Image (spheres, rainbow, N blue to C red):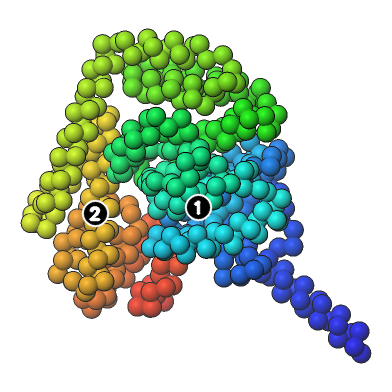
Amino acid sequence: MKKINTAIFLVITCILSACSQPSVVEAGKIYPHIPLKNDTSLSYAVYIPKKIKTNLAFIFFDPHGSGLMPVQLYQPLADEFGILLIGNNNAANGMDFPLIATHFSTLLNEIKKDYQLNETAIALWGFSGGAKAAMYNAGLNNAIHYCIYGGAVSETQNNNTAILGFNGRQDMNYTDLLEYAMQQQQNTHHFQIEYNNKHAWADTTTAKDAFRWLLFDKMRNKEIPTNKKIIRDAYNSYQKEVKKAFDGKQYIAAYQACAKAIYLLKSLTDLNYFIHQEEEISKLALFKVEVEKWQASIHQEMQLKAQYNAYYFSKDTLYWKIEIEQLQKKSTTDATGMQARLLGFLSLMSYSYATRAFAEGNLAALSQILFIYQHADPTNAEQAFMRAKLYLLNNNLDLAKSALQEAIQLGIDSNRINNDVKVKGLINPLKN
């Protein structure tokens, strides 16, 4: 009887274990939520490449605590380059960095053992608030030598960390990241890549350079075999990028493509083509004119940001409606990206003001704040969710339902709804 009971106990234990964590993580399959053995309240997403495998891994920090998001996005690149993807589900905007670091330490210790990794094989990669968290944690661990940021940046305490940045030309934080790059000009361990995007994780075409960056550095250090095909493919890709930008008379972009190729491919192949092209572009009168226009737009942008900050509450909604409509119209033809960045700036400022106003119960201010937020960033689910909360506080149930439905259609994180009892109560009426 004892043996039967023991056998039943073991079967039940195995079933429960299977429900919480897969016994074997299969290659080619994305796992969105694997609880840690030492603390089941913590978890991570993971993807093991199908065929090619290295001993390298990216650990992602998403601002919303969704490790799955970047893992899903970069899964094709993982298969192409053989790098393991791990999404940290335990770091999000609003959390204290020391707490994030404690959670990360628990995660790191477990995945090192489970996936046979060491810190020197790991690169931390974060976007927006996640970028700050990634850089903070890279600074705490002297054995982690690689960190990638995008959408935001902060100082790292570890001067030996190799840092790669992605800076979107339409990102509201573009000038902040640009300033950081200028501060790091003498730092040979830092490089920043500009690309055409708003405030978001880098697209797969752009993000491919992060995979190359890590692999190329390992090749230079003789830690992995030199892969001539990957080097050749990168060379050809950068050559096409330079030619396309030059033919399109985008001389700054062409110059930047040369600089990127020289930095990423150094010591791995002949770089005379890119060195020569960079020198020739720098001599062009049209290049110098383009640089002057770009510098003027940056100066104008800084002035407008200061003006918007001063006008935010002193100007009425009619002023903001007209101003935002002009920004949106100009953004469709603005090659500098300034108009899009200003819209993003208004969106971020509105989010910050709205968060504070909700905490203070300032309903009068929220009406203007969310008007600006909605018009500046209509496809942002957060502004619709906040409007639903405001309508609820004003006892306007119909408008609250409509705004929540809009937030859901725009992709609001279901956890935001589930964690707000009052807003969650609107879900059932929406289904009826």
What count of labels does the image hold? 2
**Residue 251, percent across and down?**
33, 18
Residue 55's tag is none
Q: Secondary structure at mark 2?
A: helix
Q: Which residue is mark 2?
A: 349
Q: Quadrant of the C terminus?
A: bottom left
**Residue 417, percent across and down?**
40, 70
**Residue 425, percent across and down?**
38, 78
**Residue type (three-letter) at the residue carrying disc 2:** Met
Q: Is residue 205 visible?
A: no
Crowding around mark 2 (Cα neighbors within 10 Å: few <14, some 14 to 19, many 20+) is some
**Residue 174, percent across and down?**
31, 39
Marks 2 and 1 sit apart, C-alpha to C-alpha, by 30 Å
Near-viewer residue (276 or 388): 276
Choose the circle earlier in sequence order: 2 or 1: 1
Q: Quadrant of the N terminus?
A: bottom right
Please name the residue shown 31% across and 10% down the image.
283
Near-viewer residue (288 or 378): 288
Q: Secondary structure at mark 1?
A: helix
Q: Is residue 163 visible?
A: yes
Quadrant hosting residue 246: top left
Near-viewer residue (121 or 201): 121
Q: Is residue 285 above or below residue 125?
A: above
Please name the residue shown 68% across and 49% down the image.
117
Quadrant hosting residue 331: top left
Please name the residue shown 42% across and 73% down the image.
419
Q: Which residue is mark 1?
A: 140
Please name the residue shown 47% across and 41% down the image.
159
